[in-house]
Amino acid sequence: MKQKDGRNEMKEFLVMVSMGLPGLGCLVGGFGVLKAAGVYSIPGAVLIAIGCTLILCTGYYHYRKDYAGGAGKRGLARFILITVFSALAGVIATGTLLRLLRN
């Protein structure tokens, strides 16, 4: 990973937040539209597609800024591993917490 100063890290964080949070909002809103409709609907699918695009752009931006430097393919592999493991941990933790809170 590249060494950076605090100002650059804050800019990168703000860019990722400005793309990631609206992406999550569109994704959740799209699934809400689909759930409310009960069937496949174009507006829900469009919101999900926009949300996924924003989230993927956020991930790509993060990869290009932190992992793509001199590491080459090892940087991409490391980024994918970190992303997959953190996503799985988040899904498992969320499922566990929801089960605990329901009881």
Image (cartoon, helix red, strand yellow):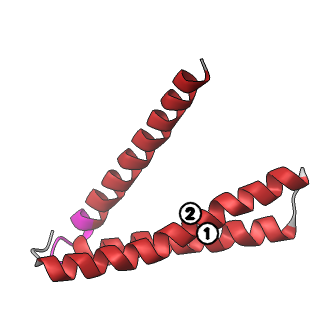
Q: Up-down: is 34 above or below 89?
A: below
Residue 74, picture quadrant: bottom left
Q: Up-down: is 20 above or below 12?
A: above
Secondary structure character of the magenta stretch overall: loop
Report the side of 38 relative to 55 (left or right): right
Three-letter code, disc 1: Gly
Residue 68 in view, yes or no:
no
Residue 60, picture quadrant: bottom left
Give the image location of residue 79, x and y in percent.
30, 61
Q: Examine the structure image and report whether residue 70 is included in the region drawn in magenta.
A: yes
Dot 1 or dot 2, earlier in sequence = 2
Residue 46, picture quadrant: bottom right
Give the image location of residue 44, x and y in percent.
79, 65
Q: What's drawn in magenta, residue-wise? A: 68-75
Report the side of 33 relative to 99 (left or right): right
Q: Are marks 1 and 2 in contact (CB under 8 Å)?
A: yes
Q: In the rendered structure, find residue 24 and report the number of the disc placed on it.
A: 2
Residue displayed at 38% across by 80% down: 15
- What residue did someone put label 1 on? 51
Give the image location of residue 12, x and y in percent.
29, 78
CA distance separating discs 1 and 2: 6 Å
Number of numbered discs present? Answer: 2
Residue displayed at 75% across by 55% down: 32
Q: Up-down: is 31 above or below 5?
A: above
Disc 2, SS: helix
Residue 48 vs residue 101, the one in the foreground:
101
Disc 1, SS: helix
